Amino acid sequence: MDLRSASVVLDVGPGIRPQSVIRCAVHILLEPHRPYLDAVAGDYIRWNATWEAMALLPDAAVDTVVALDFIEHLTKADGRRFLAEAARVASSQVVIFTPLGFMRQDQTGPTDAWGMGGMAWQRHRSGWTPEDFDGYEVEVLAGFCREDENGPRAVPVDALWAVRSL
């Protein structure tokens, strides 16, 4: 996967693990669950909001939008809207990482895997395949998802990278 360098990255839904695939001077974390933002150490701009807040940004406001392990938490319709908004906000590229197809994940216990109460944000609501990423370069990684919220998976799930150059 060919990723471009970037000065400004908008990292959507990073949870407690901001993206590290693209080095940048300005790294903006857009995360709806405040305890996740508070748990992240480092020099970031922290934006406590849902992805829909991207509508407040002008066209081409950042170089790159990165959404790793994020889009599967949206419904398919919202995911499509997110992809369109990400392409509007980015001037250079959109980078997506997600399980291949639907990978069940329901946080039904008293707390999420990190003890931060983000169960509602952890539920998977959709599955994505290469056909969903028209105009993107897609690479499938066989057996990449080896764990879920309960620990090691009996059968690993494939994942995919999707990168759209703008």
Image (tube, rainbow, N blue to C red):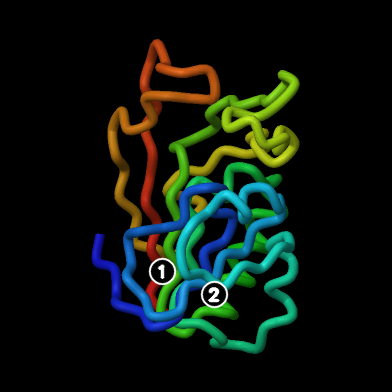
The answer to which image quadrant residue 114 occupies is top right
Q: What element carries label 2?
A: helix
Q: Which residue is drawn at 38% across and 63% down?
A: 163
Viewer-side residue, 73 vs 130? 73
Name which residue type carries label 1.
Arg
Q: Quadrant of residue 22?
A: bottom left
- x then y, percent, for residue 68: 47, 52
User: How many numbered marks have been drawn onto this rendered protein structure?
Assistant: 2
- Residue at screen point 59% across, 54% down: 13
* Residue 5 in the figure: left or right of residue 164: left
The residue depicted at 46 percent of the width and 44 percent of the height is: 98
Q: The residue under label 2 is which amino acid type?
A: Ala
82 w.r.t. 123: above or below = below
Count neighbours of disc 1 (C-alpha within 10 A) and say few if under 14, some if 14 to 19, many if 20 or more. Answer: many
Residue to which mark 2 is pinned: 87
Numbered mark located on residue 164 in the image: 1
Q: Position of residue 109 (x, y in %)?
A: 72, 19
- Which SS class for mark 1? strand
Q: Where is residue 70 in the image (x, y as percent from the top left)?
A: 56, 49
Where 126 sits versus 47, above or below?
A: above
Cβ atoms at labels 1 and 2 below 8 Å apart: yes
Image x and y of residue 97, in percent:
43, 50
- The residue at the far top in this view is 154
Separation of residues labelled 1 and 2 (CA atoms): 8 Å
In primary-sequence order, the first of circles 1 and 2 is 2
57 with respect to 72 (left or right): right
User: In screen coordinates, is 58 left or right of 120?
Assistant: left
